[in-house]
Amino acid sequence: MNKLGKLADRSYFDQVIHAMRMRGFVEFAEVTTTAKDAKYHVPATECRNTAMFFHLPQRTLIIQLDYNESDSYDQYDFIKEEEKIGVTGCWSIEFHMEFLPFKMISQRIVKANIPSEEWDSEINKIPFFHRSPESIAGFPHSSGKICYSQRNSTCDKVDPEAIADGIGDVIDQIADILEGGQFSELQVTGFPPYYTFPGCEVGFWNKFNRSELRRLVRRAWGSDGLKR
């Protein structure tokens, strides 16, 4: 029998941060949520959410990386002792961004001497503008939120460089058509892991680097405890 999965070592997250930095992203906040902060949404003896937030300098872009871990699968009565796999992890990646006005993006396409009959198709090629990217580092996706939902033990974690390269390759396609400076506003309801740790919002924001968020976002809204 293989060794049961355990919570990921700190070194794994350090590798993710390093890989993201190598692609030009800057980490500005990190929050760990455990059962000491709020009760996990299903029975588990081991559970943790690690949320990391990165921005791209001089661009209205925030990338949210969440790694949710638990041994909740093993808590079901029908799971035999020899079938238990311990802690498994699930990555999710969410993108928050503000594009330049549509008129400015359209003008760039016109100036590129692209035939008028191809303008719509060129607009539709822009990741996140009218569509989600087809894939990022092999992650299935929905509505701009990328979720790695397969159950993996910690010995099968997604490679940090694959995560950073997948994100970087997509952002490279849109970096020059994002606004500069601050977000005008940003809904941050999904920053805390409110689904897996219900009631964690106040504790989450107490740990969050809110001064840096205020530098990046003119008006953040949509989460309990944010203004405290």
Image (spheres, helix red, strand yellow):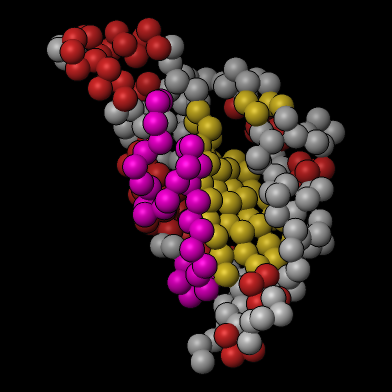
Residue located 47% across and 37% down the image? 144
157 or 228, which is in the foreground?
A: 157
Given residues 135 and 170, the one toward you in this image is 135
Q: In this view, does 225 lie above or below 3?
A: above
Which quarter of the rendered picture does the C terminus lie within?
A: top right
Q: Image height check: is 117 above or below 138?
A: above
> Measuring 37% from the left and 21% from the top, which residue is drawn there?
177
Residue 62 % position (x, y): 53, 35
Residue reaching furthest front?
78
Magenta-drawn stretch contains 138: yes
Q: State the extent of the magenta-drawn residues as a range.
A: 129-157
Splitting the image into 4 quarters, where does residue 178 fall?
top left
179 is higher (above) or lower (below) than 14:
above
| Residue 44 locus on image (x, y percent) | 73, 70
Q: How many discs mark residues in the rendered view? A: 0
Look at the image and tell me whether residue 21 can be seen.
no
Taking the magenta stretch, the answer to whether it contains residue 28 is no
Q: Is residue 225 left or right of residue 60?
A: right
Position of residue 57 measured from the top left corner of the image (x, y, whole percent): 47, 30
Q: Does any portion of residue 153 appear in the rendered image?
A: yes
Q: Which residue is drawn at 55% across and 43% down?
A: 64
State the image coordinates of residue 91 (x, y, percent, origin top left): 53, 56
x 48%, y 56%: residue: 148
